[in-house]
């Protein structure tokens, strides 16, 4: 007695003699049948439906996750020097439009942005006029202008303390673009770790 075999793709239909699949069914796998079932609830618990074949709504897979310090450093290094487009910048500002911070968050933010000694800088570094006066209008490494830096990186030129944050004399300050500043700090960090 010869019995017919079912197609191995999982469709539930019978195949021809000595075949494993119905024609064109060999490409069907678990994802195909997931898509056929339609959208599923997002596994993050938000209550919305993910796209067919997906377990999460885009970016919801990170909800509630706390990255380790090592992972945060890797993410930071991978994003270093990336140029954000005007479209992305507009999306980011639209996301935060109308949001207000709690008084506690405002206080933490203001303490974090205080210049004198809060971040280890010398006392004179709290004087913004002094900082602006010693900053040159171009990057001392690659020659990028202030306007080009704003256009490419969305930020003004940086000031680099060659002998550490406690030295703020004009001879100890170097003006760099964001890219050169990041490269320099990565090189310094690698030298401290003994990689170079």
Image (cartoon, helix red, strand yellow):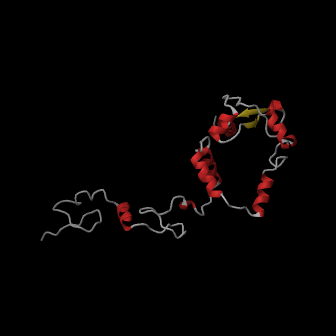
Task: Give the percent coordinates (x, y) of residue 104.
Answer: 77, 63
Relative to 106, is 62 on the left or the right?
A: left
Say above or below: 45 vs 86: below
> Is residue 169 something that shows in the picture?
yes
Q: Residue 76 versus residue 149: which sits nearer the camera?
A: 149
Q: Residue at x 25, y 57 (%)?
A: 24
Q: Quadrant of residue 128?
A: top right
- Tell me the quarter of the image containing the C terminus: top right
Relative to 18, is 80 on the left or the right?
A: right
> Is residue 67 something that shows in the picture?
no
Task: Give the percent coordinates (x, y) of residue 161.
Answer: 77, 36
Q: How many marks?
A: 0
Q: Residue 103 versus residue 13: which sits nearer the camera?
A: 103
Say above or below: 25 vs 149: below
Q: Residue at x 59, y 53 (%)?
A: 91
Relative to 127, is 177 on the left or the right?
A: left
Task: Give the percent coordinates (x, y) of residue 154.
Answer: 65, 42
Relative to 12, is 118 on the left or the right?
A: right
Task: Give the percent coordinates (x, y) of residue 61.
Answer: 53, 61
In the displayed orientation, state which residue is furthest to the left: 1
In the displayed orientation, state which residue is furthest to the right: 123
- Tell me the quarter of the image containing the N terminus: bottom left
Q: Residue at x 84, y 39 (%)?
A: 129
Q: Residue at x 30, y 56 (%)?
A: 27
């Amino acid at each position: 007695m010869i019995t017919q075999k079912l197609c191995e793709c999982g469709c539930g239909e019978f195949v021809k003699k000595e075949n494993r699949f119905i024609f064109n069914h060999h490409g069907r796998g678990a994802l195909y049948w997931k898509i056929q079932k339609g959208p599923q609830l997002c596994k993050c618990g938000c209550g919305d439906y993910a796209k067919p074949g997906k377990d999460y709504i885009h970016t919801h897979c990170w909800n509630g996750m706390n990255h380790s310090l090592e992972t945060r450093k890797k993410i930071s290094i991978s994003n270093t020097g990336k140029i954000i487009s005007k479209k992305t910048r507009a999306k980011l500002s639209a996301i935060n439009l109308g949001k207000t911070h709690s008084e506690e968050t405002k206080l933490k933010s203001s303490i974090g942005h205080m210049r004198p000694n809060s971040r280890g800088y010398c006392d004179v570094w709290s004087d913004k006029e002094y900082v602006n006066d010693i900053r040159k209008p171009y990057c001392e490494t690659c020659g990028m202008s202030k306007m080009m830096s704003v256009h490419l990186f969305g930020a003004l030129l940086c000031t680099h303390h060659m002998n550490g944050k406690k030295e703020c004399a004009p001879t100890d300050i170097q003006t760099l673009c964001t890219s050169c500043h990041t490269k320099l700090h990565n090189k310094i960090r690698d030298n401290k770790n003994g990689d170079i």
